[in-house]
Image (cartoon, rainbow, N blue to C red):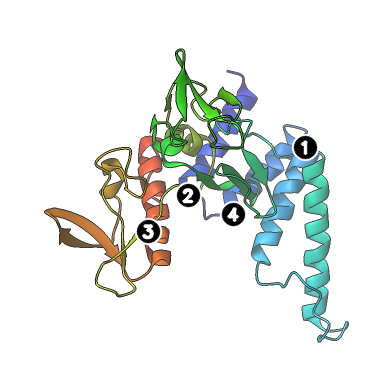
Amino acid sequence: MDARHSEYLALLRRILEDPADDAPRIVYSAWLQEEAGDELRAEFVRVQLELARMSDVPQQRPHWIPVCEPAYRQWERAETLRRRELDLWSMGVSGSLDAVPDEWTITVAGHAKGEHNAFISRGFVSEVRLTCATFMGGPCGRQCWKVVGSEYTVAYESERPDASLVRCPGCHGTGRVEGLAAALFAAHPIERVTLTDREPTRLEDGGEGCAWLIQRSPSIRSGIPADLTNFLTGRDSLTNGVFIPIYPSAAHAKTDLSKACVRYARELAGLPPVP
Protein backbone atom coordinates (compact mmCIF):
# COMPACT_ATOMS: atom_id res chain seq x y z
CA MET A 1 0.00 0.00 0.00
CA ASP A 2 1.56 3.32 -1.05
CA ALA A 3 1.53 6.51 1.02
CA ARG A 4 -1.15 8.19 -1.11
CA HIS A 5 -3.59 5.30 -0.70
CA SER A 6 -2.93 5.29 3.05
CA GLU A 7 -3.75 9.00 3.17
CA TYR A 8 -6.95 8.36 1.21
CA LEU A 9 -8.06 5.62 3.60
CA ALA A 10 -7.37 7.84 6.62
CA LEU A 11 -9.40 10.69 5.10
CA LEU A 12 -12.23 8.32 4.17
CA ARG A 13 -12.30 6.92 7.70
CA ARG A 14 -12.80 10.42 9.13
CA ILE A 15 -15.70 10.98 6.73
CA LEU A 16 -17.26 7.60 7.55
CA GLU A 17 -17.04 8.16 11.30
CA ASP A 18 -19.17 11.32 11.18
CA PRO A 19 -21.22 11.53 7.96
CA ALA A 20 -22.92 14.77 9.06
CA ASP A 21 -19.66 16.71 9.43
CA ASP A 22 -18.58 18.68 6.35
CA ALA A 23 -15.08 19.43 7.66
CA PRO A 24 -13.49 16.06 6.71
CA ARG A 25 -15.05 16.33 3.25
CA ILE A 26 -13.52 19.79 2.76
CA VAL A 27 -10.12 18.40 3.77
CA TYR A 28 -10.64 15.50 1.37
CA SER A 29 -11.49 17.89 -1.46
CA ALA A 30 -8.29 19.85 -0.85
CA TRP A 31 -6.29 16.60 -0.80
CA LEU A 32 -7.84 15.51 -4.09
CA GLN A 33 -6.76 18.74 -5.76
CA GLU A 34 -3.35 19.23 -4.18
CA GLU A 35 -2.10 15.68 -3.68
CA ALA A 36 -4.08 13.40 -6.00
CA GLY A 37 -4.31 15.86 -8.89
CA ASP A 38 -8.02 15.17 -9.39
CA GLU A 39 -9.30 18.72 -9.81
CA LEU A 40 -12.69 17.78 -11.30
CA ARG A 41 -13.53 15.37 -8.49
CA ALA A 42 -12.38 17.97 -5.94
CA GLU A 43 -14.65 20.57 -7.53
CA PHE A 44 -17.56 18.11 -7.58
CA VAL A 45 -17.25 17.59 -3.81
CA ARG A 46 -17.11 21.36 -3.17
CA VAL A 47 -20.10 22.03 -5.46
CA GLN A 48 -22.23 19.41 -3.75
CA LEU A 49 -21.24 20.66 -0.29
CA GLU A 50 -22.30 24.20 -1.18
CA LEU A 51 -25.54 22.93 -2.73
CA ALA A 52 -26.34 20.98 0.43
CA ARG A 53 -26.03 24.19 2.45
CA MET A 54 -28.54 25.81 0.06
CA SER A 55 -31.13 23.05 0.27
CA ASP A 56 -33.88 25.54 1.17
CA VAL A 57 -33.38 27.50 -2.08
CA PRO A 58 -36.30 26.73 -4.45
CA GLN A 59 -35.68 24.83 -7.68
CA GLN A 60 -37.96 27.14 -9.67
CA ARG A 61 -37.04 30.72 -10.42
CA PRO A 62 -38.64 32.98 -7.75
CA HIS A 63 -40.33 35.49 -10.10
CA TRP A 64 -41.94 37.31 -7.17
CA ILE A 65 -38.54 38.39 -5.82
CA PRO A 66 -36.86 41.45 -7.37
CA VAL A 67 -33.58 40.70 -9.16
CA CYS A 68 -31.73 43.01 -6.80
CA GLU A 69 -32.81 41.08 -3.70
CA PRO A 70 -30.28 38.77 -1.95
CA ALA A 71 -32.77 35.87 -2.18
CA TYR A 72 -32.77 36.14 -5.97
CA ARG A 73 -28.98 36.21 -6.16
CA GLN A 74 -28.91 33.16 -3.90
CA TRP A 75 -31.23 31.34 -6.31
CA GLU A 76 -28.97 32.31 -9.22
CA ARG A 77 -25.97 30.90 -7.38
CA ALA A 78 -27.80 27.67 -6.60
CA GLU A 79 -28.90 27.33 -10.22
CA THR A 80 -25.31 27.81 -11.40
CA LEU A 81 -24.15 25.15 -8.96
CA ARG A 82 -26.85 22.71 -10.08
CA ARG A 83 -25.80 23.08 -13.70
CA ARG A 84 -22.14 22.64 -12.81
CA GLU A 85 -22.97 19.58 -10.70
CA LEU A 86 -24.63 17.90 -13.68
CA ASP A 87 -21.80 18.95 -16.00
CA LEU A 88 -19.20 17.41 -13.70
CA TRP A 89 -21.33 14.30 -13.25
CA SER A 90 -21.57 13.88 -17.01
CA MET A 91 -17.77 14.02 -17.15
CA GLY A 92 -17.62 10.87 -15.04
CA VAL A 93 -16.46 12.35 -11.73
CA SER A 94 -18.68 10.18 -9.53
CA GLY A 95 -15.52 9.02 -7.80
CA SER A 96 -15.09 5.72 -6.02
CA LEU A 97 -18.21 3.57 -6.12
CA ASP A 98 -16.71 0.57 -4.36
CA ALA A 99 -19.25 -2.09 -3.36
CA VAL A 100 -21.99 -0.52 -5.55
CA PRO A 101 -23.00 -3.08 -8.21
CA ASP A 102 -22.65 -1.95 -11.82
CA GLU A 103 -26.33 -2.57 -12.59
CA TRP A 104 -27.55 -0.10 -9.95
CA THR A 105 -28.92 3.32 -10.88
CA ILE A 106 -26.52 6.02 -9.62
CA THR A 107 -27.89 9.55 -9.55
CA VAL A 108 -27.40 13.06 -8.19
CA ALA A 109 -30.91 14.17 -9.13
CA GLY A 110 -32.80 12.26 -6.44
CA HIS A 111 -35.06 10.32 -8.81
CA ALA A 112 -35.27 6.60 -8.07
CA LYS A 113 -35.55 4.06 -10.89
CA GLY A 114 -35.96 0.36 -10.21
CA GLU A 115 -35.36 -1.39 -6.93
CA HIS A 116 -31.62 -0.69 -6.51
CA ASN A 117 -30.41 2.90 -6.37
CA ALA A 118 -27.55 4.93 -4.91
CA PHE A 119 -27.81 8.69 -4.43
CA ILE A 120 -24.76 10.97 -4.43
CA SER A 121 -24.81 13.95 -2.06
CA ARG A 122 -22.05 16.10 -0.58
CA GLY A 123 -19.58 14.23 -2.78
CA PHE A 124 -20.35 10.65 -1.71
CA VAL A 125 -23.06 8.01 -1.70
CA SER A 126 -25.43 9.20 1.02
CA GLU A 127 -28.49 7.04 0.45
CA VAL A 128 -29.22 3.60 -0.95
CA ARG A 129 -32.45 1.92 -2.01
CA LEU A 130 -32.26 -1.84 -2.28
CA THR A 131 -34.07 -5.06 -1.44
CA CYS A 132 -33.83 -6.57 2.00
CA ALA A 133 -32.01 -9.63 0.65
CA THR A 134 -29.46 -7.45 -1.15
CA PHE A 135 -28.85 -5.47 2.03
CA MET A 136 -28.68 -8.35 4.53
CA GLY A 137 -28.18 -11.44 2.39
CA GLY A 138 -30.39 -14.48 2.08
CA PRO A 139 -32.86 -15.95 -0.40
CA CYS A 140 -33.16 -13.85 -3.53
CA GLY A 141 -35.58 -11.00 -2.94
CA ARG A 142 -36.76 -11.22 -6.54
CA GLN A 143 -38.42 -14.58 -5.79
CA CYS A 144 -36.92 -16.38 -8.77
CA TRP A 145 -39.63 -17.69 -11.03
CA LYS A 146 -38.39 -21.24 -11.50
CA VAL A 147 -35.30 -23.43 -11.67
CA VAL A 148 -34.01 -24.49 -15.08
CA GLY A 149 -31.34 -27.11 -14.64
CA SER A 150 -29.29 -25.85 -11.71
CA GLU A 151 -29.88 -22.12 -12.25
CA TYR A 152 -32.58 -19.86 -10.85
CA THR A 153 -34.30 -17.84 -13.55
CA VAL A 154 -36.93 -15.13 -13.90
CA ALA A 155 -39.41 -14.35 -16.65
CA TYR A 156 -38.02 -11.52 -18.75
CA GLU A 157 -40.29 -8.45 -18.32
CA SER A 158 -43.26 -10.68 -17.61
CA GLU A 159 -44.53 -13.36 -15.24
CA ARG A 160 -46.28 -15.22 -18.07
CA PRO A 161 -45.28 -18.88 -18.43
CA ASP A 162 -44.46 -18.33 -22.11
CA ALA A 163 -42.12 -15.39 -21.42
CA SER A 164 -38.43 -15.72 -22.16
CA LEU A 165 -36.50 -16.94 -19.12
CA VAL A 166 -33.13 -15.47 -18.19
CA ARG A 167 -30.69 -16.00 -15.37
CA CYS A 168 -31.95 -14.01 -12.38
CA PRO A 169 -30.01 -10.70 -12.24
CA GLY A 170 -30.49 -10.53 -8.48
CA CYS A 171 -28.86 -13.81 -7.45
CA HIS A 172 -27.08 -14.57 -10.78
CA GLY A 173 -28.67 -17.98 -10.87
CA THR A 174 -27.70 -19.15 -7.35
CA GLY A 175 -31.01 -18.49 -5.58
CA ARG A 176 -29.25 -16.50 -2.84
CA VAL A 177 -27.61 -13.10 -2.58
CA GLU A 178 -24.77 -11.92 -0.35
CA GLY A 179 -25.56 -8.98 1.89
CA LEU A 180 -23.92 -5.70 0.89
CA ALA A 181 -24.52 -3.83 4.16
CA ALA A 182 -21.00 -4.07 5.59
CA ALA A 183 -19.22 -3.43 2.29
CA LEU A 184 -21.39 -0.42 1.41
CA PHE A 185 -20.93 1.23 4.79
CA ALA A 186 -17.20 0.53 4.85
CA ALA A 187 -16.88 2.52 1.59
CA HIS A 188 -19.53 5.24 1.82
CA PRO A 189 -20.89 7.65 4.49
CA ILE A 190 -24.46 6.43 4.01
CA GLU A 191 -27.10 8.15 6.12
CA ARG A 192 -30.35 6.70 4.75
CA VAL A 193 -31.45 3.22 3.69
CA THR A 194 -34.73 2.21 2.05
CA LEU A 195 -35.63 -1.45 1.75
CA THR A 196 -37.67 -1.38 -1.45
CA ASP A 197 -39.50 -4.66 -0.82
CA ARG A 198 -40.63 -3.98 2.74
CA GLU A 199 -43.82 -2.17 3.77
CA PRO A 200 -45.23 -1.74 7.29
CA THR A 201 -48.48 -3.50 8.15
CA ARG A 202 -51.51 -1.45 9.18
CA LEU A 203 -52.84 -2.34 12.60
CA GLU A 204 -56.18 -4.12 12.73
CA ASP A 205 -57.82 -1.68 15.18
CA GLY A 206 -58.91 0.62 12.35
CA GLY A 207 -56.57 3.43 13.38
CA GLU A 208 -53.63 5.00 11.60
CA GLY A 209 -51.02 2.93 13.40
CA CYS A 210 -48.56 0.64 11.59
CA ALA A 211 -46.17 -2.08 12.64
CA TRP A 212 -43.18 -3.99 11.38
CA LEU A 213 -43.80 -7.72 11.56
CA ILE A 214 -40.93 -9.96 12.55
CA GLN A 215 -39.85 -12.13 9.64
CA ARG A 216 -40.29 -15.81 10.48
CA SER A 217 -39.78 -17.02 6.91
CA PRO A 218 -38.61 -15.48 3.60
CA SER A 219 -42.18 -15.65 2.33
CA ILE A 220 -43.25 -12.84 4.69
CA ARG A 221 -42.35 -9.98 2.36
CA SER A 222 -43.34 -7.28 4.87
CA GLY A 223 -41.41 -8.93 7.68
CA ILE A 224 -38.22 -7.51 9.18
CA PRO A 225 -35.32 -9.94 9.74
CA ALA A 226 -34.64 -10.64 13.39
CA ASP A 227 -31.12 -9.17 13.14
CA LEU A 228 -32.66 -5.75 12.48
CA THR A 229 -35.33 -5.76 15.16
CA ASN A 230 -32.90 -4.94 17.98
CA PHE A 231 -32.12 -1.67 16.21
CA LEU A 232 -35.75 -0.56 15.88
CA THR A 233 -37.10 1.92 18.43
CA GLY A 234 -40.86 1.62 17.90
CA ARG A 235 -43.09 0.99 20.91
CA ASP A 236 -43.31 -2.76 21.47
CA SER A 237 -46.71 -4.42 21.44
CA LEU A 238 -47.42 -8.06 22.22
CA THR A 239 -49.24 -9.60 19.25
CA ASN A 240 -49.87 -13.34 18.94
CA GLY A 241 -47.16 -13.99 21.51
CA VAL A 242 -44.57 -11.86 19.66
CA PHE A 243 -43.43 -8.34 20.48
CA ILE A 244 -43.62 -6.13 17.39
CA PRO A 245 -42.62 -2.45 17.08
CA ILE A 246 -45.58 -0.18 16.31
CA TYR A 247 -45.70 3.41 15.05
CA PRO A 248 -48.28 6.19 14.61
CA SER A 249 -47.93 6.12 10.80
CA ALA A 250 -46.21 4.35 7.91
CA ALA A 251 -43.87 7.32 7.49
CA HIS A 252 -42.69 6.96 11.10
CA ALA A 253 -42.18 3.22 10.60
CA LYS A 254 -40.10 3.69 7.44
CA THR A 255 -37.96 6.40 9.05
CA ASP A 256 -37.21 4.16 12.02
CA LEU A 257 -36.37 1.23 9.74
CA SER A 258 -33.93 3.43 7.81
CA LYS A 259 -32.20 4.43 11.05
CA ALA A 260 -32.15 0.79 12.18
CA CYS A 261 -30.51 -0.26 8.91
CA VAL A 262 -27.86 2.43 9.37
CA ARG A 263 -27.14 1.34 12.94
CA TYR A 264 -26.96 -2.31 11.91
CA ALA A 265 -24.67 -1.72 8.93
CA ARG A 266 -22.34 0.67 10.78
CA GLU A 267 -21.88 -1.95 13.48
CA LEU A 268 -21.08 -4.58 10.84
CA ALA A 269 -18.57 -2.21 9.21
CA GLY A 270 -16.81 -1.52 12.52
CA LEU A 271 -17.91 2.11 12.62
CA PRO A 272 -19.00 3.98 15.77
CA PRO A 273 -22.65 4.92 16.21
CA VAL A 274 -23.65 8.10 14.42
CA PRO A 275 -23.06 11.06 16.78
Q: Amino acid at mark 3?
A: Asp
Could you say where residue 265 lies in the image, as x and y percent from the top left?
A: 40, 41
Quarter where residue 133 is shown = top left
Please give the residue where the numbered disc 3 appears in the rendered image.
256
**Could you tell whether 84 is left or right of 11 in the image?**
right
Q: Secondary structure at mark 3?
A: helix
- The 10 Å Cα crowd at callout 1, few under 14, some 14 to 19, many 20 or more, is few
Question: Of circles 3 and 4, which is in front?
Answer: 3
Q: Alpha-carbon distance for marks 1 and 3? A: 34 Å
**Could you tell whether 45 is left or right of 2 in the image?**
right
Q: Secondary structure at mark 1?
A: loop
Q: Alpha-carbon distance for marks 3 and 4? A: 24 Å
Q: Secondary structure at mark 2?
A: strand
Q: Residue at x 88, y 82 (%)?
A: 67
Image marks 2 and 4: residues in contact by CB distance under 8 Å:
no
Badge 1 or badge 4: first in the primary sequence: 4
Q: Closer to the camera, 154 or 58?
A: 154
Badge 1 or badge 2: first in the primary sequence: 1
Image marks 1 and 3: residues in contact by CB distance under 8 Å:
no
Q: Alpha-carbon distance for marks 2 and 4? A: 20 Å
Q: Residue at x 58, y 37 (%)?
A: 158
- The 10 Å Cα crowd at callout 4, few under 14, some 14 to 19, many 20 or more, is few
Residue 22's label in the rendered image is: 4
Q: Residue at x 81, y 67 (%)?
A: 77
Q: Alpha-carbon distance for marks 2 and 3? A: 10 Å
Image marks 2 and 3: residues in contact by CB distance under 8 Å:
no
Q: Alpha-carbon distance for marks 1 and 2? A: 25 Å
Q: Is residue 225 visible?
A: yes
Please give the residue where the numbered disc 1 appears in the rendered image.
92
Could you say where residue 103 lies in the image, as x and y percent from the top left?
A: 63, 33
Please give the residue where the numbered disc 2 appears in the rendered image.
193
